[in-house]
Structures are given as C-alpha cells and as structure tokens.
Image (spheres, grey):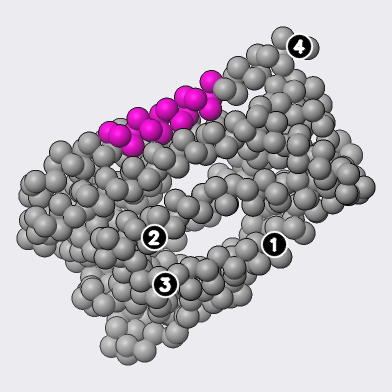
C-alpha cells in the first residue's frame, strides 16, 4: 500500500511537470513563429492585411503567449500546493472545527478551492485586459465595469454551483453502488438545462441583446435561413463593443428556440455578403450536427471519468498519493476534478484535430450557399481586426487550435472557388 502511494505520487508529479513543460515549450514555439514571420504578410492576405497589421498581430500573439507561460507555471504550482503541499488538509482541518455536517463541509471545501483558483488567476486577467489589450487597442472595459462583471459572475456562480455541489455530494453518498451513474445523469441533465437557460437568463446580465434593426440585412439572412432549412427564434445584436473591439457571431439554444447572435463589432466591419458567409459557416455546424456530436463526446468522457472515480475512491493510495489524509466523498470528487485536466491534456491534440475537421466541413457547407470569396474575405478581415497571427507554429496549432491555421483554411476555400 505504501509503495502504491509513492507510485501514484510520482505519476502525478510526472504528469504535472510534463504537462506544464509541454505548455511552456509550445507557447515558446508559438511566440518564436509569430515574431519570425512578422516582417512579411503571406501572399493570400496581402490585399487586405497591411504589414503594420501583420506585425501588430505578431506582437499581440507574443504578448499573450508570455502571459500564458506565467499562467501555466502558477497553475502548476497552485495544484502542487493544494495537493501534496497540504492546503486541502489545512482547509479541511479548519472547516471540521466549525461545520459538523459532512456534505456542507464538503461543499465549503470545494468552493474554497475554486475561489482560491479564481483569485490566483485574477492578476493575470487584469494584466491582459488593462495592459496588453489596452496597448493593442482592443480593451473597451473600464475598471468599474470589470468589477461589476466580477461581482455578477461571482453571485451567479455561487447561486448555480453551491446547489450543484451539494446535490452531487448527496448523490455520491446516498445512492449506493450506482452513485456514479446517477451523478453522470445529473451532470448531463444539468449541462443541457444550462445550455438552454444561459442565453435567456444569464447572458443578458452582462450584455444587451437587441433584435436586429437592419431590415435589408435581416431580410437577406432570413432568405439564407430558409434555403438552409434553419428555424430560428430571432436575430439579435449584442453590444460586444462594451468590453472589446473583437468581433464574433454565434448560436444559442435548442430546437426552434435557437437564437442567432451577432457582435455589433462584427456587423460594423463586414459587408452584408461577408456576414451572410459567416452565418452560412455557422449553419454548417448545425447541418452536420457538430454541436450535438460534441455534447455526446463530452458526455461519454464524463461517463468514463465517473466510472473511474468509482474505482479510485475506494483506494487509500488515491488520497495519500495526492497528499490528502481525509478520505471522504468530497475529497474524492475534488481530487478527481483537480487531476482530470492532467490526463485530458494529452488527448487535446485529438480533440483539436476533430474540431478543425468540423471547421473545414462548415466552410465547405458555407460555400454551397455563399461564394467562397465572401467567406475568405470575411475571415481575412476577422484575422486582421482580432490581431490573430497568420503564421502560428504548426505543433502549437496541432495541439491547441480548434480552428485550422489561417493559410490552410484560406487555401481550402480557394479550392472551393474552382
């Protein structure tokens, strides 16, 4: 048993160091690639993107990767301290002197760790928003708005998370040997409900969503939706410019209640035909059921994870190998949540590859209902306006990027024009 404890500790430390070192290494490669190619705009982008914009994207990418490197190291140190460093034990000892109910104590423990994690990440978030994004002209957020958002997010998170953690721990301790199956069902239903409720009740707390007022554009969009057989609950414009100059568009909701949301910054920068091309791409995701497939994959991963947790929670080495002396439902669930990213980190390239494949499929679908040249121009403008690097490192991109590299994506669109 003692040897198993040491072995598990060594496995944990190896995964922790290896994942952190990989993230730092890949970020350094990304930084080097962006800077190396900053002096020359790739041929396919020269008509729209000027050299100064290309250099700006390289510098912005460099600044973000440096922040990421610091973040990776801090996160690794934090994970070490709360496990083998003994913080979980100390917090548990403090709570046990004030709380007698096991479930409430477990909720408090998990909540405190989550709050500590958020507090540790806060300085880098402030630095990125008010130093880096401000420097490159993207930030539109004031300090007062940042604080307001933080308070709203904290309150909403507490209202949602506390009952969820309590329910999870109750299921863990009261539904017998099949607890993990019932907990999986609970989490699955909860996630689906949140996907449905978020656009209706949570998103409006942070942004305004107004029905699209541009009648000519709205009419063109409705014609496109009819061609694609897509039913929508409305077209909305979000005041994304309140916080940033970055542009985007997305869908929310299920069934006939799906909403199409455009950032106001996106509508300001693209022509009507380019907006239709972007929308056609998003419709491609729904036509290929990419969203549903991704949800199914996530549910399968969580199913396997909870089944594994059912095995781990009965083994003393699982707790002691991570430096935790109190062996109960709350610490089992917390430790599993904490170490899962270390395991899932190494399957990220597979998930990223699958996501990029979906993007190519959505692009191909868009080209059936909109000229490839319109989608190409819209993407180039978005790369320019969001200061996205056109020359990412290939290994970094393969590991992280959910979207294909700019050059590869544009090349694929050129083939659709022929």
Say above or below: 413 vs 350: below
Structural distance between the alpha carbons of marks 1 and 4: 39 Å
Q: Majority secondary structure of the magenta segment? A: helix
Q: Earlier in the sequence, mark 1 or mark 4?
A: 4
Q: Position of residue 317 (x, y in %)?
A: 75, 20
**Mark 1 falls on what kind of element?**
helix
- Counting from the top left corner in percent of width and height, residue 93 is at 82, 38
Can residue 196 be seen in the rendering of this structure? no
Residue 198 location (% of width, % of height):
58, 68
Mark 2 or mark 4: which comes first in sequence? 4
Disc 2 to disc 4, C-alpha distance? 47 Å
Q: Which residue is mark 2?
A: 129
Q: CA distance from mark 3 to mark 1?
A: 24 Å
Tell me if mark 3 has few (under 14), some (14-19) or many (20+) residues whose alpha carbon lies within 10 angstroms of its own.
few
Is the Cβ of the residue at disc 3 closer than 8 Å to that at disc 1? no
Q: Which residue is mark 4?
A: 2
Label 4, residues with CA under 10 Å away: few <14, some 14-19, many ≥20: few
- Separation of residues labelled 3 and 2 (CA atoms): 10 Å
Q: Which residue is mark 1?
A: 158
Residue segment shown in magenta:
14-29
Q: Is residue 401 above or below residue 154?
A: above
- The kind of secondary structure element at disc 4 is helix
Which residue is depicted at the point 74% across and 58% down?
Answer: 162
């Amino acid at each position: 048993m003692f040897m198993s404890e040491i072995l598990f500790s060594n496995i944990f430390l190896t995964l922790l160091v290896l994942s952190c070192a990989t993230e730092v290494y890949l970020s350094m490669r990304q930084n080097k690639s962006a800077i190396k190619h900053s002096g020359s705009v790739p041929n396919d982008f020269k008509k729209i993107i000027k050299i100064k914009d290309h250099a700006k994207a390289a510098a912005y990418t460099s600044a973000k990767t440096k922040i990421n490197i610091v973040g990776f190291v801090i996160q690794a140190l934090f994970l070490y301290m709360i496990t083998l460093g003994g913080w979980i034990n100390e917090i548990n000892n403090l709570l046990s002197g004030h709380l007698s109910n096991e479930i409430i104590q477990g909720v408090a423990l998990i909540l405190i760790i989550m709050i500590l994690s958020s507090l540790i990440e806060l300085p880098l978030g402030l630095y990125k928003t008010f130093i880096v994004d401000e420097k490159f002209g993207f930030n539109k957020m004031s300090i007062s708005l940042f604080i307001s958002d933080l308070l709203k997010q904290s309150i909403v998170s507490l209202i949602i998370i506390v009952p969820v953690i309590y329910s999870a721990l109750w299921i863990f301790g009261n539904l017998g040997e099949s607890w993990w199956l019932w907990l999986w069902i609970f989490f699955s239903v909860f996630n689906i409900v949140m996907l449905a409720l978020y656009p209706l009740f949570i998103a409006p707390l942070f942004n305004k969503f107004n029905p699209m007022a541009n009648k000519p554009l709205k009419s063109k969009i409705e014609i496109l939706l009819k061609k694609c057989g897509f039913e929508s609950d409305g077209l909305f414009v979000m005041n994304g410019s309140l916080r940033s100059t970055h542009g985007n568009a997305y869908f929310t909701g299920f069934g006939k209640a799906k909403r199409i949301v455009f950032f106001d910054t996106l509508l300001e920068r693209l022509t009507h035909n380019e907006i239709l091309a972007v929308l056609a791409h998003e419709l491609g995701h729904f036509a290929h059921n990419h969203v549903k497939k991704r949800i199914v994959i996530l549910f399968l991963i969580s199913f396997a994870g909870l089944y594994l947790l059912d095995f781990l929670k009965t083994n003393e080495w699982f707790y002691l190998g991570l430096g935790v002396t109190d062996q109960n439902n709350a610490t089992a669930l917390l430790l599993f949540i904490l170490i899962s990213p270390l395991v899932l980190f190494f399957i990220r390239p597979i998930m990223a590859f699958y996501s990029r494949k979906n993007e190519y499929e959505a692009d191909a679908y868009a080209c059936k209902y909109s000229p490839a040249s319109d989608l190409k121009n819209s993407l180039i403008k978005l790369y320019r306006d969001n200061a996205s690097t056109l020359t990412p490192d290939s290994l970094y991109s393969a590991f992280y990027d959910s979207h294909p590299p700019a050059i590869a994506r544009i090349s694929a669109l050129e083939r659709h024009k022929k």
